[in-house]
Amino acid sequence: SGNAVNVTVTGAAGQIGYALLFRIASGHLLGPDTPVRLRLLEIPPALKAAEGTAMELDDCAFPLLSGIDITDDAKKAFDGTNVALLVGARPRTKGMERGDLLEANGGIFKPQGEAINAGAADDVRVLVVGNPANTNALIAQRNAPDVPAERFTAMTRLDHNRAISQVATRLRVPVTEIKKLTIWGNHSATQYPDLFHAEVGGRNAAEAVNDDAWLRDTFIPTVAKRGAAIIEARGASSAASAASAALNHIHDWVNGTPEGDWTSMAIPSDGSYGVPEGLISSFPVVCKDGRYEIVQGLEFDDFSRERIDASVTELGEERDAVQQLGLI
Ligand code: NDP
């Protein structure tokens, strides 16, 4: 139909893609009233698998799904796109140095940024899921100079959701009781899940936990290393939870965060909280009228400040590395 929203998914034949596409088509990305047209981007060896997924999508007869295009051409995939979910990335393989990883991903995210710049719709919103997500988002953003920088974001919502689940379990309360949680920094082992500004049933969450050792030695590492724990248990990396978080990220960006709460998104820094301008770093954000704003005025003790600084320093190093590689 003419008013369908164009949603591009890269790496569509992968694990996360398989968990993501059926939920997008059933209305969990933009809501139950918005038809979607899917654009699947894959590399040539995975096109056939993407076609298989498209056959299954057809077989669901989703009322909201108005069409599916499959391509290995980024220009076609992003032409007129309104929402771009960049999931496909080059994973780190054995013996790969960080520089090699960043370079391999530069080969993916630079042309995708250029294609978004050339053809995306004026209201395009980009979410990078493929790792290293923050720096991949930076590469895409810097290669799309005509698109407002704030449209490029990276996903820390899965970390955010994992943190909520851990605190809720610890305090034996429903997840809906936990508000104002924040993931700061990079989507990596240095990320900082902040309980000091979070609330549980209206009370300060760190005070409700009242156990500094648990917070420092259990909560933070459990959230940061949850991906490895899933691989260990499942024999494969998290996919459905990553897809679910990607839906949450775009849904809240477009439809707004609930009154009295905020969420975590990695977004280009405006210099808030001492994060160098331009770095794509995770902040507490409130979304309203299709835009996000960083929550201002939070204060930190030394413990939180040091952790945020360490993660932001890592982001700066990744930016310097991709700059040296000529990717930005
Ligand atoms: P997945 O679908 O499992 O993961 C895709 C990306 O998401 C990886 O970079 C992965 O990072 C990342 N990711 C981010 N957060 C999470 C999380 N919480 N849990 C797990 N992964 C997370 O990978 P597959 O290998 O199954 O599929 C990738 C697909 O992408 C393949 O089909 C491949 O052909 C395609 N691809 C497409 C490209 C394109 O469209 N141009 C380019 C490159 C690949 P990490 O590896 O660090 O877990």
Image (cartoon, rainbow, N blue to C red):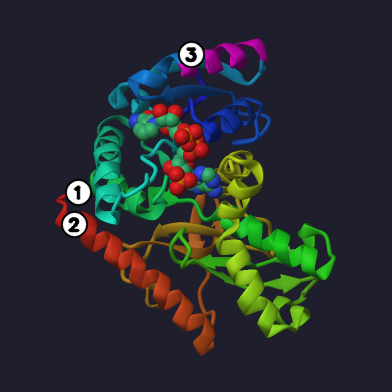
Whether pointer 1 and pointer 2 mark residues with C-beta atoms closer than 8 Å, the reply is yes
Q: Does the rendering let one see residue 171?
A: yes
User: Farthest residue toward the right?
Assistant: 172
Crowding around mark 2 (Cα neighbors within 10 Å: few <14, some 14 to 19, many 20+) is: few
Taking depth in this image into account, of 143 and 18 the one nearest to the observer is 18
Element at badge 2?
A: helix
Whether pointer 3 and pointer 2 mark residues with C-beta atoms closer than 8 Å, the reply is no
> From mark 1 to mark 3, how far is it between C-alphas?
32 Å
Q: Amino acid at mark 2?
A: Gln
Q: Earlier in the sequence, mark 3 or mark 2?
A: 3
Q: Is residue 52 magenta?
A: yes
Q: Is residue 237 magenta?
A: no
Residue at the disc numbered 2: 323
Q: Earlier in the sequence, mark 1 or mark 3?
A: 3
Q: Which residue does the image show at 29% across and 37% down from the upper left?
A: 108
Q: Which mark is residue 51?
A: 3
Boundaries of the magenta span: 49-61
Image coordinates of residue 87 in percent, x first then y, are 45, 38
Quadrant of residue 130 within the rendered picture: top left
Residue at the disc numbered 1: 327
Q: Which residue does the image show at 47% across and 62% down from the upper left?
A: 282
Image coordinates of residue 182 in percent, x first then y, are 58, 67
| Image vertical order of residue 64 relative to residue 272, above or below | above
Quadrant of residue 115 within the rendered picture: top left
Q: Which residue does the image show at 34% across and 72% down from the upper left?
A: 313
CB of mark 1 near ligand 1 (< 8 Å): no
| Image vertical order of residue 24 relative to residue 110, above or below | above
Image coordinates of residue 166 in percent, x first then y, are 71, 63
CB of mark 2 near ligand 1 (< 8 Å): no
Crowding around mark 1 (Cα neighbors within 10 Å: few <14, some 14 to 19, many 20+) is: many
